[in-house]
Image (cartoon, helix red, strand yellow):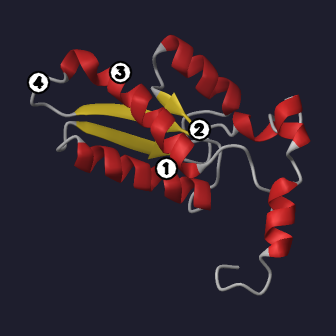
């Protein structure tokens, strides 16, 4: 399995920041603000499970004021439809995996691309491998 430049914490932090900005006008209200988050990733996949966990965390952290409805398997559109939906305002958020391809394009990342492989190779035999 290849490591990507996008970590779970980075994904959660980015989406949480976006949810906070989108919810800013209604923060003082007691009603729940719902968001639509789409992805082309398969229902039940690790990425989908991470998005569901993120939705739970946002709901709990906002005391029920912010609810994210996660739609996997391109239920509300493929990548192009999700991008268009966010531009039109019919989709609030999407996880498309766009950041996954950036590692080889950025010279800074390309120079360090093999470092994690070296760390993993050195860690063989340790309790955390």
The quadrant where residue 2 appears: bottom right
Closer to the camera in the image, 83 or 118? 118
Q: Name the mark on residue 95.
A: 2
Q: Secondary structure at mark 2?
A: loop
Q: Give above or below for 121 relative to 37.
A: below
Give SS at disc 4. loop
Residue at (69%, 25%) from the top-left corner?
A: 80
First in sequence: mark 3 vs mark 1: 3
Circle 3 crowding by C-alpha within 10 Å: few under 14, some 14–19, many from 20: some
Residue at left 38%, top 47%? Answer: 55
Q: Which residue is mark 3?
A: 22
Q: CA distance from mark 4 to mark 1?
A: 25 Å
Quick check: marks 4 and 3 in contact, CB under 8 Å?
no
Question: Residue shown at 69%/40% (left/top)?
Answer: 97
Asked if 8 appears above or below 77 in the picture, the reply is below
Q: Quadrant of the C terminus?
A: bottom right
Q: Secondary structure at mark 1?
A: helix
Which residue lies under the disc numbered 1?
Answer: 51
Instruction: Verify CB contact (< 8 Å) between mark 2 and mark 1.
Output: yes
């Amino acid at each position: 399995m290849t490591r990507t430049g996008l970590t779970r914490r980075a994904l959660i932090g980015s989406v949480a920041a976006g949810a906070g900005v989108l919810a800013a006008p209604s923060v003082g209200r007691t009603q729940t603000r719902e968001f639509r988050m789409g992805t082309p990733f398969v229902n039940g996949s690790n990425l989908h499970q991470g998005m569901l966990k993120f939705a739970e965390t946002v709901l709990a952290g906002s005391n029920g004021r912010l609810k994210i409805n996660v739609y996997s398997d391109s239920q509300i559109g493929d990548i192009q439809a999700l991008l268009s939906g966010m531009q039109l305002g019919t989709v609030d958020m999407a996880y498309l995996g766009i950041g996954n391809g950036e590692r080889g394009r950025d010279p800074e990342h390309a120079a360090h691309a093999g470092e994690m492989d070296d760390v993993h190779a050195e860690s063989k035999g340790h309790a955390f491998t």
